[in-house]
Image: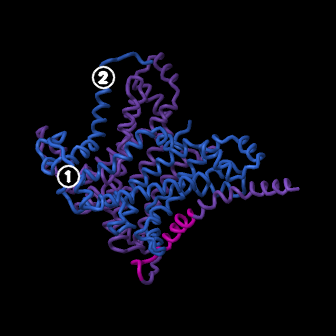
Chain colours: A blue, B purple
Amino acid sequence: MPTKNLPAQIFLHLLLIMGAIFMLLPLFWCVSSSFKVSGEIFNYPPTLFPKQPILDNYKELFSKFPYGRWYVNSILVTTLLTILSVFFCSLAGFAFAKYRFALRKPLFAVVLAALIVPFQVILIPLYVITIKLGWMNTYYALVIPFMASPFGIFLMRQFMVDSIPNEVMESARIDGCSEFAIFLKFALPLSRPALGAFAIYQFVFSWNSFLWPLIVLNETEKYTLPVGLQSLFGIFYLKEFGTLMAGSALMIIPVVSLFVFMQKHFVSGLTVGAVKE
Amino acid sequence: MLKNIACLWQNKQHRIAPYLFISPFYILFAVFMVYPLCFGLYLSLHEWSGIGEMTYVGLGNYVNLLKDPDFHLAFSNTLWYMGASLVINLVFSLLLAVLLNSALIKAKKLFRTIYFVPIVTSVVAAAIVFTLFYDRDYGLFNVLFMALGRKPLDWLGSTSLSKLAVIGLIAWRWTGFNMVYFLAGLQSIPRSLYEAAVVDGASPLQSFLKITLPLLKPVILFVVVITLIGSIQIFDEPYILTGGGPADSSMSLVIYLFRTGMEYLNLGYAAAIGFIIFGMTFILSWIQINLMGGFEGEKS
């Protein structure tokens, strides 16, 4: 143990607290401003808390704009994508982790290679394909192309290799369990931490996804939250900041709370394959 | 007899099961990843506005990119973002991780959570709040500046400051994210090494330089590569904060790709920019894979 050094300890804590304030300030400012009257947001000197908190910004958000609709859209797309991609990736990851079959190595190598392909290189061709399929302004375009996540299959495989004992699979087979039933009854429950990690990752990714929905959605009613909020920002530039802050706060809060509760899983998912133990 | 058939079926099922399990993934993968990649390459050799005939131009798009001043600007801006992100990660994220790994610090978990929160926040929402902070007349940053007796700055409206404003948002969002990798790396270094160093009379700086840095090298390398790759692909932050302006001073490669494809409807040219981005990413990944000794890290 290092010798106790109180002044250094206090100094380091102060440093961390200052950094933490800087990290939380935008979130605090966002929530605080959302309850301020328009003029107060630009007060000099700025006020930390609203002098007279109001709900008008929130009312305006829902009454003048299809914000509620965007919210529902975002929840729908995010939930669908999360469930489906977790299912497909864990199914494939299970096959790679627990079966010996021809083509196993080359097929998995293709997935690893795909990890380095940036989305931007397929952006334009995917846009053309989306038009050809008649998927513009639909949620198919936001969900289906992203269900096969190379990161997801990689994560699930790495986890399942060690966490599902072969003996359990063998005895299940002797009891007459089908292979798919083994997946559902043993593989999925035993991989809960990895499923959770990937689900949160996918949820956060989808909820915040901006570039692709911006390209695919051009009907106001179909917008997801980031695209909708950005369109309001375009209309309001430097005017109705209170409403923008209300919209931002409602968008940030669910994901931040989800993260705070589930951070252990989220972080363990991120570091899979990055750090050798 | 019946039992034998059941056994046979089970055997057969065992053999085809893995193929059935991977097939949905690979069908999706082929249609929405492999095919677009091939089609994109084909597209990048053509001139096409999305309707009518495609005109074959060979490597024309790539040759034109080399001569295109807007592309040069987007490229050099992106290099700025790459460089700045690298400094942020190697200075702030690493120091933060070392601090949060130190026995001197209390409430580690709370700090870790707070520093990580920005990455799960929507960029759109964060960029809107930062627009408020960067405002020339009322922004919080300028209020602080003036309190220090300095003149207010036009963060988003000046060609010399716009990139810096974008970098500020990037620093806020990504510092905690990369801290996680460094922390994971630091936690895998045995404490006994540090204890031995203390016994030998090493200063904290000496143990950092002689123990932490060398043992953290693979993680540092990993973070360097993902940071560089991530910054090549930067879009959301500058697009929402400045729209790439003023006068394209904060335009990134992906903003240029987006404009070329979506606004100027020059799809072949945009696809070619995509492949330049791919090429840069590929080189970086290749370097990383070689330096780390292939896919050794995989469990087989």
Read off the residue under disc 2: A10
- Residue A142 x %, y %: 44, 62
Residue A141, labelled with which disc? none
Q: Nearer the viewer, mark 2 or mark 1?
A: 1
Q: Looking at this view, is A232 or B32 the one in front?
A: A232
Q: Is residue B91 visible?
A: no
Name the quadrant containing residue B157: bottom left
Read off the residue under disc 1: A56
Name the quadrant containing residue A239: bottom left
| B60 horizontally vs A246: left or right | right
- Residue B26 x %, y %: 60, 61
Residue at (33% x, 22% y) in the render? A9
Residue at (63% x, 61% y) in the render? B23
Kind of residue at disc 1: Asp
**Chain hosting mark 2:** A
| B148 horizontally vs B69: left or right | left
Q: Is residue A217 visible?
A: yes
Marked residue nearer the N-terminal end (2 or 1): 2
Q: Quadrant of the N terminus of chain B?
A: bottom right
Which residue in the rendered view is the most extreme toward the right?
A: B1
**Chain hosting mark 1:** A
Magenta residues, start to end: B28-51
| Magenta segment includes B44 | yes
Label 2 SS: helix
**Please, is residue A257 above or below residue A148 in the view?**
above
Q: Looking at this view, is A192 or B172 the one in front?
A: A192
